[in-house]
Image (tube, helix red, strand yellow):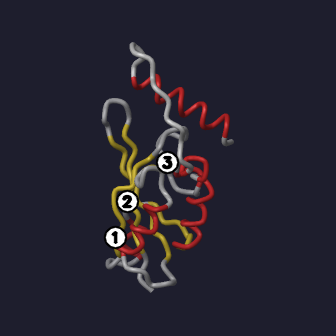
Amino acid sequence: MTNLILHYLHRDEGNWKDRFAACIQNPAGCTAEQAEGMIRECLIDGEFFYPQNVGLSFSVATDWHELDCVEADAEGLALLATSSRCFIGITLESLLDDLKESNKAYLRPMKIHKIPAGIPIRLAVCWLEFLRQVIYP
């Protein structure tokens, strides 16, 4: 059984990045490419998620984090435990289930409305995010 390492990051408004990694158990023996494809299907826009909702380390609890890549753990868990990466004992299947459940509201198609002229796009995105959380708690 080859474990997988999930690499993800948080970008703030200044485009500063906090990088994270987590070791995921892979009892089914999926390749890193297959696992990344399955994970991306469960993410918001194929790349964003809330790590605190699935038990992963996070930088800012209310912000999306971005999936960078998934790689096979060829080095073994001993090196992972001594590095700055985070080891968690979840399986790929449970991660996929948690991602689907936590992003369920965001994966539904949204009805698009026109944004009035003069409203900054950042404000419009924040407002739409607030509405999403109110409508789909």
> Is label 2 in a helix, a strand or a loop?
strand
Disc with the residue nearer the chain's start (2 vs 3): 2
x then y, percent, for residue 3 = 43, 77
CA gap between label 1 and label 2 equals 8 Å
Residue 82 versus residue 26 in the image, above or below: above
x then y, percent, for residue 91 = 55, 73
Q: Residue sitting at 37 percent across and 40 percent down?
A: 11
Camera-nearest residue between 81 and 63: 63
x then y, percent, for residue 20 = 40, 54
Q: Is residue 52 left or right of residue 17?
A: right
Which part of the image, by quadrant, shows the N terminus?
bottom left
Residue 50 versus residue 16 in the image, above or below: below
| Badge 1 vs badge 2, beta-carbon distance below 8 Å | yes
Question: Local crowd at mark 3 within 10 Å, few (<14), some, or many (≥20)?
Answer: many
Say which mark, if any, is on residue 58: 3
**Amino acid beneath label 2:** His
> Is label 3 in a helix, a strand or a loop?
loop
CA gap between label 3 and label 1 equals 19 Å
Which part of the image, by quadrant, shows the C terminus?
top right
**Amino acid beneath label 1:** Glu
Say which mark, if any, is on residue 71: 1
Q: Residue sitting at 34 percent across and 62 percent down?
A: 69
Q: Residue sitting at 53 percent across and 56 percent down?
A: 56
Say which mark, if any, is on residue 7: 2
Disc with the residue nearer the chain's start (1 vs 2): 2
Question: Local crowd at mark 1 within 10 Å, few (<14), some, or many (≥20)?
Answer: some
Say which mark, if any, is on residue 50: none
CA gap between label 2 and label 3 equals 12 Å
Q: Is residue 123 left or right of residue 93?
A: left
x then y, percent, for residue 48 = 44, 49
Camera-nearest residue between 83 and 117: 117
Residue 133 versus residue 94 in the image, above or below: above
